[in-house]
Image (cartoon, grey):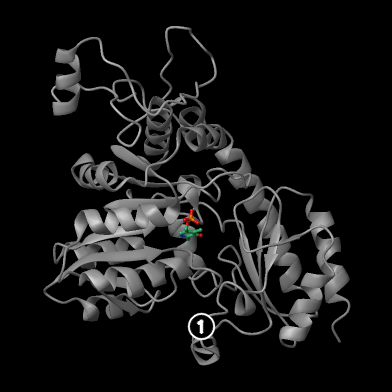
Amino acid sequence: MSDQPRYQPETLAVRAGQERSQFGEHSEALYLTSSFVFKSAAQAAKRFSGEEVGNVYARFSNPTVSMFEERLAALEGAEDCVATASGMSAIMALCLAHLKQGDHIVASNSLFGATVQLFNNILSRTGISTTFVSHTDPTAWEAAIRPETKLFFLETPSNPLTEIADIRVLSEIAHAKGILVAVDNCFCTPILQSPLALGADLVVHSATKYLDGQGRVLGGAVCGPKKLTEEVFKYLRTAGPTLSAFNAWVLLKGLETLKLRVEAQAANAARLAAWLEAHPKVARVFYPGLPSHPQHDLAKAQQKSGGAIVSFEVKGGREQAWAVVDHCQLLSITANLGDTKTTITHPASTTHGRISPEARAAAGIGEGLLRIAVGLEAVEDLQADLERGLSMID
Ligand SMILES: *Cc1c(COP(=O)(O)O)cnc(C)c1O
């Protein structure tokens, strides 16, 4: 759509990337095919050599996957997007496409758990090392730079404490040394935050979360300028963690309602956060949309709203936190997030359970902490559900 008017996100979400077949279908078609046929031996040769653009084999490209890629790229304001089988394979592809043995990553110390494992246990075996630094202190990032540093990797807001990393400032620090900046934009989605416009070079997604938004499929993506995504594509086409056509089709439909869902879920979250902050059994609420959040001003400048993830600490410890979880009848007890159904999780015993108690305490993840990923239910119903458990705490 590059030669067309600059459309608003609502329009891009339902229109960008659509390619109609000869049948004139209104809804995007699902092309369940692993390979594509050619009109002649000569055409096959041209397709394989890249002389003629077109589909060859679904590990390389598929029209349904291409439609999803184009739509997400449009929403992120990116020149290009490469879809992957999951969020983790997007991060793996980004790293293996742009890093080699001896290279060094500086990363936030509050990344998604599997990303930490990927850097520490898998990339480390290929001779790519990582230094983890304070999420919120840009001077720590600058101090960690070595001659071999090639990548800054961050995720903001952080999980579960919703701390904000300053994308613009970190991008300036990185670019002064020729270092690439990649931002995991899973929590905010392009609806609430545009990392590329703030200076980042690449955006990664777990499409499994808000982009699907209805808890159905796994998917991921890397968005950015073509000169950077091209390397990611080359890795994918060889290594193979491509997005399936079916999942791409589900995600295409998910994108159509992304703005409506994210804005409604964030509005619910803002109301719930304010209610929790005033609750006598709650010690502290972590939500970027609240004036009490230590980085509220940065969040307001960087994000369009506080998002839909709210964490809070109940008065007491694990026993009190678990009592709240166990009295929920409506909220789903699961660590997933980004769904239309509200979920509740106790980070210290689930997502962050493998970290030592000392490291958890240092990271500020207490035994009384709960994380809610707010969905589309009525706030009154969510409050009543939480109140059942909170009323049990003395
Ligand atoms: C879930 C998640 C991932 C990993 O995505 P998968 O699709 O589960 O592989 C990466 N980053 C963040 C912030 C996530 O929440």
Report if residue 200 is visible in the image: no
Residue placed farthest to the bottom in the image?
358
Question: Residue 78's image quarter?
Answer: top left
Residue drawn at the location 83% of the way across and 75% of the way down = 390
Image position, residue 223 (x, y; %): 33, 45
Image position, residue 255 (x, y; %): 52, 36
Image position, residue 194 (x, y; %): 40, 49
Viewer-side residue, 81 vs 244: 244
Viewer-side residue, 223 vs 125: 125
Q: Would residue 230 appear left or right of 350 to someone viewing this image?
A: left
Please say if 384 is above or below 7.
Answer: below
Report if residue 148 is visible in the image: yes
Image position, residue 347 (x, y; %): 61, 74
Q: In the picture, which quadrant includes the C terminus?
A: bottom right
Viewer-side residue, 293 vs 35: 35
Q: In the picture, which quadrant includes the N terminus?
A: top left
Question: Is the residue indicated by label 1 positioned so its CB lies within 8 Å of ligand 1?
Answer: no
Count of numbered circles in the view: 1
Question: Residue 94's image quarter?
Answer: bottom left
Residue drawn at the location 81% of the way across and 57% of the way down = 330
What amino acid is labelled 1 in the image? Answer: Ile
Please say if 214 is above or below 18.
Answer: below
Please say if 353 is above or below 9.
Answer: below
Q: Which residue is mark 1?
A: 355
Q: Would residue 234 appear left or right of 306 to someone viewing this image?
A: left
Question: Residue 138's image quarter?
Answer: bottom left
Q: Secondary structure at mark 1?
A: loop
Residue drawn at the location 84% of the way across and 82% of the way down = 393
